[in-house]
Image (cartoon, rainbow, N blue to C red):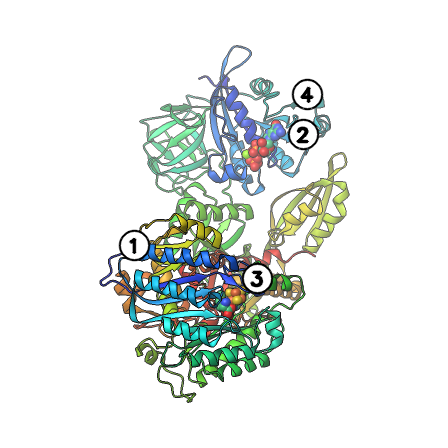
Amino acid sequence: MGRPESQPQNLSIYIAIPFCQVRCAYCDFNTFAGLDDLMAPYARALAREIRLVGEAAAGRPVHTIFFGGGTPSLLPLLVYQDIFAVLRGAFALTTDCEITLEANPGTVDAAYLLGLRALGVSRLSFGVQSTHASELRLLDRLHSFEDVRQAVALARAAGFDRASHGLNLDLIFGTPHQTLAMWQASLLRVLALEPEHLSLYALSLEHGTPLRSWVQRGLLPMPDADLAAEMYGWAGELLAAHGYGQYEISNWALPEKAEGRSRRSDPQVSDLRLLAPGRYQCRHNLQYWRNRPYLGLGAGAHGCAAGWRYSNVLAPGAYIARLEHGVVGEFPFSPAAVERTRQTRADEMGETMLLGLRLTAEGVGGADFEARFGATLAAAYGRRLRHLRGLGLLAWDEAGARLTPAGRLLGNRVFREFV
Amino acid sequence: MDTAHIRNFCIIAHIDHGKSTLADRLLHLTGTVPDRDTTEQILDSMDLEREKGVTIKASAVRMSYTAADGQQYEMNLIDTPGHVDFGYEVSRALAACEGAVLVVDATQGIEAQTLANLYLALGAGLEVLPVINKIDLPSADPVGVAQEIANLLGGDAQAVLPISAKEGTGVPALLERIVEHIPPPKGDSSAPARALIFDSHYDPYKGVIAYVRVVSGQIRMGARFKLMATGVQGEPLEIGVFTPGMTPTGELSAGEVGYVATGLKTVQQCRVGDTLTLAANPAPEPLPGYQKAKPMVFAGLYPVDGEDYANLKEALDKLQLNDASLTFEPETSQALNFGFRCGFLGLFHMDIVQERLEREYDLDILATAPSVEYEVLLTSGETRLIDSPADLPDESVIEAVREPWMRIQIFTPETYYGTIMELVTRRRGAFVEQEYPAPGRVLLTYDIPLAELIVDFYDQLKSRTRGYASLDYQFHSYRQEDLIKLQILINEEPVDALAMIVHRAEAYAKGQALVSKLKELIPSQQFTIPIQAAGGGRIISRANVRALKKDVLAKCYGGDISRKKKLLEKQKRGKRRMKMVGAVEIPQEAFMAVLRLGDD
Ligand SMILES: Nc1nc2c(ncn2[C@@H]2O[C@H](COP(=O)(O)OP(=O)(O)OP(=O)(O)O)[C@@H](O)[C@H]2O)c(=O)[nH]1
Ligand SMILES: C[S@@+](CC[C@H](N)C(=O)[O-])C[C@H]1O[C@@H](n2cnc3c(N)ncnc32)[C@H](O)[C@@H]1O
Ligand code: SF4
Ligand SMILES: [Mg+2]
């Protein structure tokens, strides 16, 4: 049961598009290569799910939408025209609604991007991963860095510029054989493209991925965690020098009115906290980290709303089948939801901590926490917070709690105190 | 009942030879406990006893038996623990009986505690009735084992009774033999009352329940009692017998075994070994008591969470009510803050106490490595008893350090003679003598420092002899040795709880072994942690636990946080028994590392 909120909260919507051209060597997301035939029925099922859930949501305002993958840029523009029509009919989108779409370089052309922008997509996210041909090959990526440059130029021309919610580029570091010099080169090349947002992900060797089995069989060296830490530290300094502000463990954004790459001193944490959420910070992901409600639509999508965490069936075929006969259910569930977990107050508090502490600048605000749960941070977690502060992993004062620079790399040691 | 129809006996044996199972059969056969009650080891009433299949506390029970002669007998049985840590329970039980049934496992033959307990029983003047148990097992060798017993006790091998406690074979015959061979108690019902307290437990409503064997006279409700050693007097709240539950009878007469609910609030007032008499007509002399069990090993117990200190104290208080051999006093450690120095009968006893604290009182506790009690003679002439290595004063003020030595008996097939000799001498032990109580097997006697015995000795013995050797030990004497303190520094700080007292000649090897073990056991943290061992005024060994640079999940899976939580939960489970020492998290195993330095 949702706790009474003083005012109806803005919702976010995640929409899963689980299709890829090939599966990358490191990726274990719920995505499928070779199921292109299902795209059309999938889009129809999705439209139906949007309508059903929208009806149950009864007009709650939506301020972010995220098309994630998989590779959303594989769906044709015509399909998006239908989906957007349905979305706008079913939900009340706020005027500056942030609408992100993940795209793979090499899958987009000028007309496609112009079309998306016209439909209302306001933010693009490209998976770059690396700028080195050798690494891209190792990771089984289909594109080159040249493709990335072109895609970025096309996106800029299509209006994904500073007036939109900007452009994000994903990079992965800590891959086998990667040297610090290679990482530095990739970062510098990517910075030259002046993205408003950067996500830098440390490689994790996921179960069932080819990359993991290659490492386990000794065909590739085990990525060195110490080196990855060094890469991370180095990247943080470089990005700060280029005017990017870190706001989450893996995410950086330019401030709204940054003039090119002016050097500026490290922003005081408290100053950053005073800024309105930067235009280029990903509002959608902030919704997760602030533990605010979001709906998950599409195969394998996760949602959290009205006191529930839930997720949809994974396989696109099963998803389509479930929506064929589905009817409007109790908010927030769609006929595709297969797992539902009720959130207790204790769950919600703990999750607010372990998600919120990922936000390196704002952390978990003391006043926000108290307003939400009717208990101070000290009352709820005083002992643990003192312990973590003693370890030098956490800063905790009247304003709230947030990771120290040392804590950013050892986040799990902090988060696990709250599960 | 007239004493001629009373039989008081206990069951003694080496550990696991089947005492408690035999007690079950006796209880069923005599109808004391209905056969339908299929619980096994009925007298092992503690959860822990049942789970481990081991008797920890002796227990008494009264049975009524109609013998072949048509007469009815009152039989008082005391089941005893087999583990050597609880040997003192056996001697208490013996003092309350006229006879002992000695159980020998037909698949194992005589073992060290078979011998030790047999000698105790003979020494206490008891009639010993040997039986060979587990004859239902295919690997049983009743003939060979009977011969071993006959060699030991004299007499005819044919006369030793073969039984299966599990299936009941031979157990009716055993009942008859008990009636025939175990003498009835002697004791004058008209003399002043004297009852030996041979055990006790605490009941929240009735206070300390004293387990008594009435030796002379009579005790009954309404007659005030007096405890002769402490002088404490009181009114009995209840008097009765164990059947095996407590059944009030209102009185107990000479020769009988039962209980008196004293209403007393502490076991200190009602000591095991004391004599209970009547306040109105006290006996002139107490019965010979037996010595209180003395703790042999000492360890610090600390709450993992400092806020549990008061709960730990309360739990120890409660445990002590039923376990007079447990001692404790407050202790402060720089590393571990506030806790208790506890004394135990042995490592097994220590394990049990630790487990009960965690289970019955739901406490997360951390134990330091066990130590023995040293006698330290200072240059000032003062002698100090030291049971915590951290307390050993500076070498400059020490005249001499004396440590407890044990006399041990190892009973083993001859083939393992060499490897046992090697194990013992490596542990500073010295050979005393050998005997051959059974063909092909030898009883080896050594003297060895207790400190060496508590460090993994038993496991080593078992593994070197493939489980065939068995061990028994008793305190022997204090001896002067060249002992020094080995200190461990973690992150440049000495950690008192990791200090140990070692022989000077072994300081170097032990220091190195301990440092490398600690390096393995202390998990990487966010900074490099130097570990050093220091002894005799210098650093003996050092190593670093490398800093952990990165432990964080980079990604956000489209709002899938359950997956992340699962991983964190898994990490967290690994963390339960960690203690913060300064800025370093040290796991419980690190404090026990000294016990696992290995012999190879
Ligand atoms: N096959 C067989 N097993 C038996 C017999 N008697 C006992 N056992 C088994 O031997 C094991 C030890 O039996 P217990 O009765 O607990 O032995 P104990 O001597 O009381 O042991 P402690 O109290 O630990 O010294 C148990 O697994 C019993 O089931 C028997 O006659 N036959
Ligand atoms: C699910 S992908 C979707 C984006 C798009 N399909 C693409 O690959 O460009 C989002 C990002 O997660 C990151 N990612 C996926 N698997 C990862 C792994 N095992 N370790 C680190 N980052 C990973 C990649 O940087 C990827 O761009
Ligand atoms: S990384 Fe992106 S393109 Fe590669 S398999 Fe995963 S979702 Fe598909
Ligand atoms: Mg037993």
Same chain shared by disc 3 and disc 4: yes
Which class describes the residues within 10 Å of circle 1: few (<14), some (14-19), or many (20+)?
some
Same chain shared by disc 1 and disc 4: no
In this view, the residue in front, A23 or B285, is A23
Figure quarter occupied by ligand 1: top right
**Residue B558 pos. (x, y %):** 43, 63
What distance separates the C-alpha of mark 2 from that of mark 3?
Answer: 43 Å
- What residue is disc 3 on? B521
What distance separates the C-alpha of mark 2 from that of mark 1?
Answer: 76 Å
The chain containing the residue under callout 4 comes to B
Q: In this image, B170 relative to A233: left or right? A: right
- What residue is disc 1 on? A56
Disc 3 marks a residue whose amino acid type is: Leu
The chain containing the residue under callout 3 comes to B
From the viewer's perspective, is the residue at label 2 or at label 4 nearer? Answer: 2
Residue A212, visible in the rendered structure: yes
- What residue is disc 4 on? B159
Could you tell me which quadrant the C terminus of chain A lies in? bottom left
Which class describes the residues within 10 Å of circle 2: few (<14), some (14-19), or many (20+)?
many
Q: Note whether ligand 1 is within 8 Å of mark 2.
A: no
What distance separates the C-alpha of mark 3 from that of mark 4?
Answer: 56 Å
What distance separates the C-alpha of mark 1 from that of mark 3?
Answer: 54 Å
Does residue B561 lie above or below B431 as drawn? below
- What residue is disc 2 on? B106
First along the sequence among labels 3 and 4: 4
Same chain shared by disc 1 and disc 3: no
